[in-house]
Amino acid sequence: MKLYTNSGNYETIKILISGNISGQRLEHVEVQNSGEVKCQLFSDRFPVLEVSTSLVLQSPNAACRYVLAKGGKDIDDIHIDEWLEWESSVLKPSLLPYLVSLLNKSQVDNKLAANLQPCLQHIEMALKRTGYIYGASVTAADIVMWSTLSPLLSGKDTAAISPTVLPATYGWFKKMVDDASFKSAAQVVAQNKPLSLEVFKKSLLSLTLPTTGGVDSLSKRFKAGCNVASGQTKTN
Amino acid sequence: MWKNEIFQISRYFGVSCGNVTLDEQFRIPCLTVKDGNKVKGIATIAKYIAKNCKQQNGILGASLEDQANVDQWLEFRSSRLDRYGTEKDLSSVLKELNSYLSSRTFLVGSSVTLADLLMFYGLHSVYSDLSYFDKQRYMHLSRWFRMMQLTSGVKQKLETIPFQRNLIYPCHGVAH
């Protein structure tokens, strides 16, 4: 399997950890832009896992789980499905704008920090129960959450999120850093530098973030019988 | 919409559906199941319903590879299609789907999977607002949408979205 990625991408860590845990060999190919990727893509987001000529996974979470499953290390559980969906549809839309604002302004945007807090508390509560995101050992949920939180938790530059209010999260993050599978995956992405927000800077700033207002369309979706306004000019 | 969709998915699988509410904190749908436990998120709920149905027939993907691909499209649904903020976001979502479907009949493999079902229900309200011009512009996605609409048990009581039989606008309007 070929793993195409740009440099310093936090999502790449997930797939590399899964490869380490399940014993699947991944050929790590670092590229500058999507034009260098030979397989058929439907967007220019990285990383991309080329499983075969007919299957290219562009969802890092699906790729992470696939690599685990290939080595018999994935657990088929609805709670893990739930954590992975929550990470991609709730956590990332709150976390990424916050990280980008830190990198752009080098100061804390209070509104973005306030949006992020409930997500961090949700993780903290789970970790307080068993020391893992779900269950009593490392699952895809820990791998995915650890990688996504690594730009936030790895450096002093994000001290707005204080370790004192998230003791279980910081404890879990540090414990995993010492795990060989996590450590070597992080080293590959950070190119042997210590983890910090700076390591991920270039790839974070290259992201196209969804425009705010996404949450409004979510609320609309919930209301029965209400169409999500597309606002297209009708020509018929 | 979510509420209706979750009922439609249950009906498709011929199972009864628990109580659907909105998780106020994270603005995601929440299904309360028989033992009082909660299952959250549209893709997770759909997967839960499919997993609890006796006759799955590969609806979640027949191989590990197909399962991963189904997961990828379920995520696309909940993190991209459900979260577009502007017109531009929506058109990029439709463009990506259109280009992916230009060489495929189904999203995954060679039969209907949960990925097709959930994408169809999510797109139905979008399609009911699209002009004929846009339906032609996203022609591969539209072909897939028409096929899904005609697939037994899928559309249920939803409004039938009309399509033009022939091209009505010059071909250079097609989005690739």
Image (tube, coloured by chain):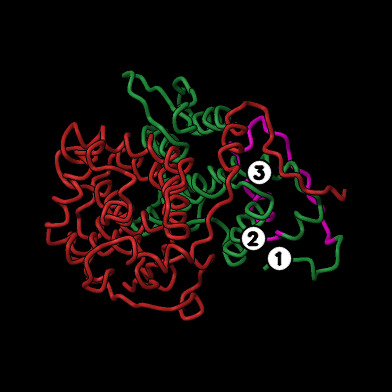
Chain colours: A red, B green
A24 or B112, nearer to the observer? A24
Q: CA distance from mark 3 to mark 2?
A: 20 Å
Q: Provide the residue designation for mark 2.
A: B95
**Mark 3 vs 2: CB contact within 8 A:** no
User: Does any portion of residue B58 appear in the rendered image?
Assistant: no
Q: Secondary structure at mark 2?
A: helix
Residue B175: which disc?
1
Dot 2 amino acid type: Lys
Q: Which residues are magenta?
A: B138-167
Q: Position of residue A28 (x, y in %)?
A: 30, 75
Q: Provide the residue designation for mark 3.
A: B149
User: Does any portion of residue A79 appear in the rendered image?
Assistant: yes
Chain letter of the residue beneath label 1 in the structure image: B
Comes first in the chain, label 1 or label 3? 3
Q: CA distance from mark 1 to mark 3?
A: 22 Å
Which residue corresponds to the image point at 57% horizontal and 63% vertical from the top-left? Answer: B100
Q: Position of residue B17 (x, y in %)?
A: 46, 23
Which residue corresponds to the image point at 19% horizontal and 39% vertical from the top-left? Answer: A168
- Quick check: B118 left or right of A153? right
Which residue corresponds to the image point at 24% horizontal and 47% vertical from the top-left? Answer: A142
**Mark 1 vs 2: CB contact within 8 A:** yes
- Quick check: B172 left or right of A36? right
The residue mark sitting in front, 3 or 2, is: 2
Dot 1 amino acid type: Ala
Total of numbered circles in the picture? 3
> How many other residues sit within 10 Å of disc 2, few (<14), some (14-19) or many (≥20)?
many
